Image (tube, helix red, strand yellow):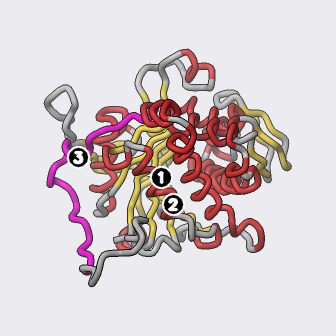
């Protein structure tokens, strides 16, 4: 099965990602422009993890870059970049439980995407990794001391459950051979708040969805979803044919594109109250590496995406096959997977 690939249509939708980057930059700049308190509040919302310090040199090397002949006239970064973006399925806390987090403790990476930004930031590839992918999970350092055990044939999303962001990053780097320059995590309830702050999101489904586990019941067609419903759409799988994680990934990719369109349509830059609400929801739900743990650093990332149009964003899913020993799990298909990761180096 070849890697699936989708592109947004032309026209107005081609501006979605560009406007999203500018809106993010504007939202994160709002604090410094409006008041010191707002800046302090938004900056304090962000949680960070020192992944570089935890992993040290035990990871793929950064690609060599050609030296610049003269300093850039613009402070906006333009080099190639790889980010691991996770949606964490927290299963603790009343708020997350009400949103369908389940009864068990701990958390898993319910959604995992490797986002590759090409040099110049004018094209991007988003690779979704199925949570049911079986991988060789490396030993990971623990914040409390010691380390996790290596495991062969472990489910991909157990890395986060056992060792948090550090182990998630190390497992992805072990799987791909690609250095993750940054880490971004959005939590369960935070995603719902972000969608609500944007005024909801409009999506179209080709099939009926009837999933008690994700609390989502939709007829096939076009729907405007609030935050709780959008989260249910991102999580649903048992309401899809065969309970397929691959089908859920397709819904997640479509949802991301719909959110970009919603950001473009909302015109956040001319609505300061809404802009602050979105910025508060976004920063309040984020965990990042220490290289992105301030408004200035996130603003720089957002500004660097200003020239990226949605037509230039390619969404693919890691090529997989059913595991020979377990039809409910998948394994990376070679050499297709290896070729995909090589293209991101």
The question of residue 46 being in magenta is answered with yes
Please give the residue where the numbered disc 2 appears in the rendered image.
Answer: 303
Q: Earlier in the sequence, mark 3 or mark 1?
A: 3
**Do labels 3 and 1 touch, CB within 8 Å?**
no
**Do labels 1 and 2 touch, CB within 8 Å?**
yes
Residue range of the region highlighted in magenta in the rendering: 45-66
Query: Residue 189's x, y, as percent?
Result: 57, 29
Tag 2 secondary structure: helix
Please give the residue where the numbered disc 1 appears in the rendered image.
Answer: 299
Is residue 324 visible in the rendered image? The answer is no
- Choose between 296 and 266: the one closer to the eye: 296
- Asked if 36 appears above or below 74 in the picture, the reply is above
Residue at 55% across, 25% down: 101
Q: Residues within 10 Å of mark 1 (few under 14, many from 20)?
A: many
Q: Residues within 10 Å of mark 3 (few under 14, many from 20)?
A: many
Tag 3 secondary structure: loop
Tag 1 secondary structure: helix
Query: Residue 326's x, y, as percent?
Result: 44, 46
Query: Residue 318's x, y, as percent?
Result: 47, 61
- Which is in the foreground here, disc 2 or disc 3? 2
Name the mark on residue 138.
Answer: 3
Query: Residue 226's x, y, as percent?
Result: 74, 35
């Amino acid at each position: 099965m070849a890697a699936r690939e989708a592109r947004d249509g032309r026209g107005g939708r081609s501006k979605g990602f560009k406007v999203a980057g500018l809106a993010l930059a504007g939202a994160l700049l709002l604090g410094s422009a409006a008041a010191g308190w707002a800046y302090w509040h938004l900056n304090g919302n962000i949680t960070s993890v020192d992944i570089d310090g935890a992993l040290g040199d035990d990871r793929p090397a950064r690609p060599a870059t050609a030296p610049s002949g003269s300093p850039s006239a613009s402070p906006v970064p333009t080099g190639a970049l790889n980010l691991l973006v996770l949606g964490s399925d927290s299963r603790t806390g009343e708020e997350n439980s009400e949103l369908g987090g389940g009864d068990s403790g701990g958390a898993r990476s319910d959604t995992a995407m490797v986002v590759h930004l090409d040099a110049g930031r004018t094209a991007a590839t988003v690779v979704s990794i199925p949570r049911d992918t079986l991988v060789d999970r490396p030993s990971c350092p623990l914040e409390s001391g010691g380390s996790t055990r290596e495991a062969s044939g472990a489910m991909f999303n157990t890395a986060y459950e056992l060792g948090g962001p550090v182990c998630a990053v190390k497992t992805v780097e072990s799987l791909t051979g690609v250095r993750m320059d940054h880490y971004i995590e959005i939590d369960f309830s935070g995603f719902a708040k972000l969608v609500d702050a944007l005024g909801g999101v409009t999506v179209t489904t080709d099939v009926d969805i009837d999933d008690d586990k994700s609390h989502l019941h939709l007829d096939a067609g076009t729907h405007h979803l609030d935050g709780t419903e959008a989260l249910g759409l991102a999580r649903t799988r048992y309401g899809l044919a065969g309970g397929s994680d691959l089908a859920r990934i397709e819904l997640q990719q479509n949802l991301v594109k719909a959110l970009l369109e919603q950001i473009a349509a909302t015109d956040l830059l001319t609505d300061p109250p809404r802009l602050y609400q979105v910025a508060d929801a976004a920063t309040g739900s984020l965990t990042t590496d220490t290289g992105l743990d301030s408004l200035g650093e996130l603003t720089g990332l957002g500004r660097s995406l200003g020239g990226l149009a949605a037509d230039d964003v390619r969404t693919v899913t890691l090529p997989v096959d059913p595991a020979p020993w377990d039809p409910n799990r998948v394994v990376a298909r070679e050499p297709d997977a290896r070729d995909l990761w090589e293209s991101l180096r």
